Amino acid sequence: MNIFILLSSILLASPQSAAVSTDLAQYTEQAGVREFTGRLIVRPLQNESAQLQASQLLAAYGLIEYVKATDEYVIVVPEGQSENALSQSLMSSGLIQYAEPDYMLYPVNTTPNDPNFGSQWQHSKMRSAAAWDFGTGDGAFIATTVDTGADLNHPDLQANLISGYNSADRQTQANGGSVGDINGHGTMTLGCVGAIGNNGVGVVGMAWDIKLMPVRCTNSSGGGAYLSDLTDGARWAVDNGARAISVSYSGGESSSVESAGSYIRNQNGLMSWASGNGGNRVYGSDHASVIIVGATNSSDNRTSWSTYGDWVDVVAPGDNIRTTTNGGGNGTASGTSFSTPIVNGVIAMMMIASPSSTPNEIEQMLFDNCVDISSSGEDVYTGHGRPDFYDCMVAADAVGGGGGGNDTIALATTSNNPAAGSSFWLTASGAPASSPYRIVYSFTDQSPFFASFNGLVHTGTTTASGTVAVIKVVPGGASGRTAFMELQSLSSGVITDSNAIRLDIP
């Protein structure tokens, strides 16, 4: 491990966009992946006149559910009419934003194998051990996977489970809703997020010590779930305290998924969704409010079966991932189903480290701290790249005030508003005497102005009295930017850090 703590499923085979043309709807189904159900999810155009007229138009159809949070109607397709025909008819009214099938969607169908294999290669690749030096969770933070339920007696999950929800029945666990794992998939995804660590049992999730909320979206042993049940489960989770939410099902290209993601983001949460295992390219569907996750292998390459396209935001380990399994054990499985909760776990830990950061800021820090494993910059195969868990925690810790060493060093500046091109002083006191230190930074925007590798701004040695004084110059093009800076020092194998200071460049 580096001695310094720095500031540093599944849409299977559907290449089309979820956007609906006003002249022709071309929705398709694939058995065992996405199947028509005789239901549509319809959202009016978001203006008062269209909403009123659309409600009158939709009154002619059987209403299954009205979703107030996202202004969506789940309606019955009349007998003798197809999903595509009804969608086309509704879209032609000029009142509808989208009218798409309420598909029956399915998780990755994988069978855990090699139960004696104890290596979780994702942790070494993502530098989890270094990331955990910032902490292993927060007993009050809630994360969830909307899936097939959870093994409620699993020794690697049980102590951290809280009361959940069955979205297929719209019933809370407290009121009798069943959340036990009906398929096995949900126990595996939940373990990727938060299997308990350091307990001498099984495996370790990305976050050791958080609350895990089981949200079961289906009552079918095959795992199939209505799209509207998936999005309802995700919305219920954020409404009931969860901030990090992931869905490892197909259907992520849906416009309704984006509506749910936008709602969740407005409630201070983030939702991640699996890209899929078809190896195909998806065109369009580049959601602004949902983090779409592809898969990588142990060589840090995108897997051949990971669905790609402009919509993919990040990729993460998804090949032969060891995690918890139904029945109290652990095993390996492959799919973007497991990449997605791994990213969800990273997001949870970042939110814990920086509790005041907005969902947009957490997302940007995630993107800014990815390893670029494909072509330079954001690309259609791997998005921003594969998150480095350690660097993500470095950035979040800086913005959050520094949790890596309990803020025992006092860092100050001569100006919190230094002009571009001007100089300013950073001074520190209370640091270990005559010890190496580093001053590092993090940003909440996309364009860092202190150009440096891995956040390194300055290194040196503290004085015999444990003080530091450094002069820095603000680059000329930094106007309008914000930076957060922190000092960290090492003495006798113990790492301490300072408070974070904020610089707003006028």
Image (cartoon, rainbow, N blue to C red):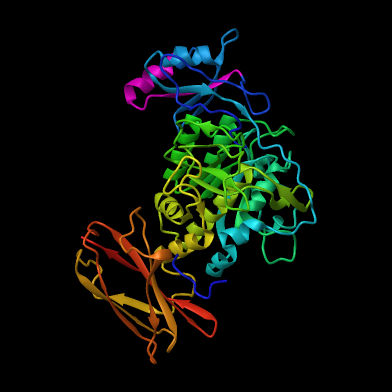
Task: Give coordinates of residue 56: x percent, y percent.
Answer: 42, 15
> In the depicted view, which residue is nearer to us: 61 or 337?
337
Farthest-out residue, top? 80
Q: What residue appears at the point 23 percent right and 66 percent down from the top-left corner? A: 417
> In the depicted view, which residue is nearer to us: 383 or 199?
383
Task: Give coordinates of residue 304: x percent, y percent.
Answer: 61, 40
**54 in the magenta segment:** yes
**315 in the magenta segment:** no
Task: Give coordinates of residue 491: x percent, y percent.
Answer: 50, 84
Question: In this rendering, is residue 357 above or below 239?
Answer: below
Quadrant in which the N terminus is drawn = bottom right
Q: What residue appears at the point 44 percent right and 49 percent down from the top-left corner? A: 268
> Residue 70 is drawn in which quadrant?
top left
Q: Is residue 61 visible?
A: no
Q: What residue appears at the point 32 percent right and 21 percent down from the top-left corner? A: 49
Direction from residue 433 to residue 294 in the image, left or right: right
Query: Magenta stretch?
Result: 38-57
Question: In this rendering, is residue 36 above or below 446?
Answer: above
Farthest-out residue, bottom? 464
Q: Is residue 266 visible?
A: yes
Quadrant in which the C terminus is drawn = bottom left
Task: Give coordinates of residue 480: x percent, y percent.
Answer: 24, 56
> Residue 468 is drawn in which quadrant?
bottom left
- Number of on-image labels: 0
